[in-house]
Image (cartoon, rainbow, N blue to C red):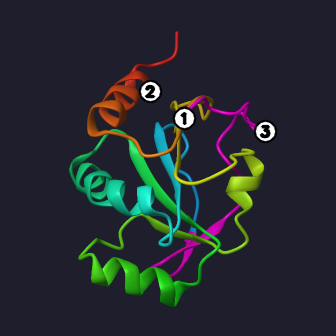
Amino acid sequence: MLAPEPGASQLPTQTLAKLDGGPAGFTPGQPVVLNLWASWCPPCRREMPMMTEIAAEETKVGMVFANQGEGEATIRRFLDAQDLPQAGMWLDPSSTMQAEFTVPGLPATLFFDASGALHHIHMGEISRAGLLSRMDEIRVPAP
């Protein structure tokens, strides 16, 4: 799918909540992969195990999974049923990030470099190769 023109071009500044409690915000100076997802979304469900596996091993790129529009209990049930980690899971019950970046559907994976600039939006299910390739691109310091 072709990615839409983003509504925003920088990392979001709003603070959300982590699934495990407490405020969630982005770490300045670190590249970030932001995945927008929901438990009812079949492609989200298919890509989540691969993405959380990579997130558990990754040290140079932050990986955030912002659930769009669902409550904490629903998210926990999904993660528990799929034996997925809660690390990196954020709550966005009002889908503010989906609106901010004007993405028309889920999943959407956004890639930001260390300066916080948006490099790419991947709409739909992403492959392991596609994810790793885009992560390599944002690891490289901007000239």
**Mark 3 vs 2, N-terminal side:** 3
Residue 59 left/right relative to 97: left
Residues at marks 3 and 1, CA–CA distance in whole angstroms: 14 Å
Q: Which residues are magenta?
A: 1-23
Q: Main secondary structure of the magenta part?
A: loop
Label 1: few (<14), some or many (≥20) within 10 Å? many
Residue at numbered disc 2:
138
Q: Earlier in the sequence, mark 3 or mark 1?
A: 3
Task: Return the residue found at the far top.
Answer: 143
Q: What amino acid is labelled 3 in the image?
A: Gly
Looking at the picture, which amino acid does disc 1 mark?
Phe
- The residue where tag 1 is placed is 112
Q: Nearer the viewer, mark 3 or mark 2?
A: 3
Which residue in the rendered view is the most extreme toward the bottom?
Answer: 73
Q: Are marks 3 and 1 in contact (CB under 8 Å)?
A: no
Q: Check residue 126 for magenta coloring.
A: no
Which residue appears at 50% of the width and 72% of the height? 40
Choose top left, top right, bottom left or bottom right for residue 131: top left
Q: Measure how far apart labels 1 and 2 are at the Cα level.
A: 7 Å
Q: Residue sitting at 60 percent across and 78 percent down?
A: 70
Q: Secondary structure at mark 2?
A: helix
The reply to whether dot 1 and dot 2 touch (C-beta < 8 Å) is yes
Which residue in the protein does label 3 denote?
7
